[in-house]
Every structure is written in structure tokens, then in C-alpha cells.
Amino acid sequence: GLTQHVELYTTAVSACQEENGSRQGLADLDRALEVYNCMQRQGVAPDKKFFAALIAVAGKADRLHQAFEILTDVAAERLWPGATICSALIHSCLVNQQYALARQVYDLCAAKGVYPELSQFNRLMDWYAGERRFGDVVSLLTDMTQRAMRTPNLNTYRVLLNACQRADQGALAFEVFALMKANKVPVLQEKKDVGSQQSLSILPMH
């Protein structure tokens, strides 16, 4: 029957992100865990998308420690934490303003060849741009395009323009803007420091 479809449970858990429950503005993790328990009683095996949704609820519920505890269940199901779960963990860290922890999660996953979805690359780079850490923006951008093979979207360009502005990289800002107008897909990579300046080289994709 319908109770045997993991997608339905995933949808139910995702809906808990919008539930306030007894705490205004927070997701309802307790209800999400009830869905998980019901799913287990029905003998339905969770998949990566389900766990990612559960982690996202935990993060939005301000219960970051439980987001990481869910990884134990992921391992018990013999699932490899791919991009979906990696992204959910990073997002949970970011919504709880645990930026250094988000980067640690990123580095641990990247060391295993696992990279987050484009949205989380954008969020990490956006935070670095706000902190005027241009080198970290460049480093993540290199990973995003060269290793994770993610294609920049309009939000990526917005982040890059913001980073260029805050780092006083006016020439690069015009270059990024020109790419946006031309609607091209760039490959950007870090160059060596020249004095106090850093730059991006933009190469066409083949």
C-alpha cells in the first residue's frame, strides 16, 4: 500500500520544516521523528533523501547535535552519505550560525570526494564574501567548478559580485558581470597571489 513508499514519509518529514509546534519559528523535529518511528514499524527502509530531510528538520529546529546523531542511523542502513546528506548537514550548520563547523563538514566530505549541492556552495561562499575572505571564496569556487563539476547559477554570480566588491576587485566584478550578460558557463580557478591581490582566471568550458 501507500505506507510502503519511502517518498511519502520523506514528504511528511519535509513538511515538518514548516511546522512551528510549541516553539515559534522552529521546525517540529519531534513530529518528524514520529514519522521516522512509524516508518520503521512499517518496515520501510529509509533512503538518502529521507535522512537528508530529517537532518534538515533537526537543523531548522535548532537541534544541531541531533542532526549529526542521525548519521549513526545512516551508517546502520549502510548508506554512503552523498551530496544530499552532505548538503543537509552543511545547511543545518549554517542556519545555526555554526560557520566553522559547516566548513569542517565540507572539508571532511570533500576529502572523501563528496561535495554538496550548488545551493550550499553558494551559501558558504556568500558567508565568506560577507567576511571579506576572498581567498576562501576563490577556493570554494575552484572546488565547485573543477572537482564537484557544479554549474554556476545566477545566485553564484551574485555571490561573486558581492565578493569582488568587498575585496575591492573592481575589474573582476566587471568580468563576472560580462559573463552574466553573455549567459556563459565559466570555469574559474584560483591564481597565485600577486602582492596583496588575488584574481580569478576564466576559461571557456569544452
Image (spheres, rainbow, N blue to C red):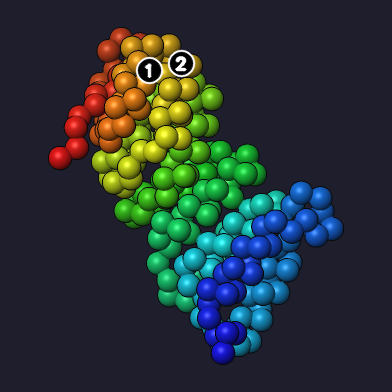
Helix, strand or loop for disc 1:
helix
Q: Residues within 10 Å of mark 1 (few under 14, many from 20)?
A: some
SS of the residue under disc 2: helix
Q: Residue 118 in the image: x percent, y percent?
A: 41, 45
Q: Residue at x 57, y 75 (%)?
A: 8
* Camera-nearest residue between 8 and 118: 8
What amino acid does circle 2 point to? Gln
Tell whether label 2 touches label 1 (CB within 8 Å). yes
Amino acid type of the residue that numbered disc 1 sits on in the rendered structure: Ala
Residue that label 1 marks? 173
Q: Residue furthest front?
A: 182
**Image quadrant in which the C terminus is located:** top left
Compare residues 35 and 184 and report the one nearer the observer: 184
- x and y percent of residue 62 in the render? 70, 51
Question: Where 160 falls versus 83 (above or below)?
Answer: above
What residue is shown with label 2?
165
Residue 64 visible? The answer is no
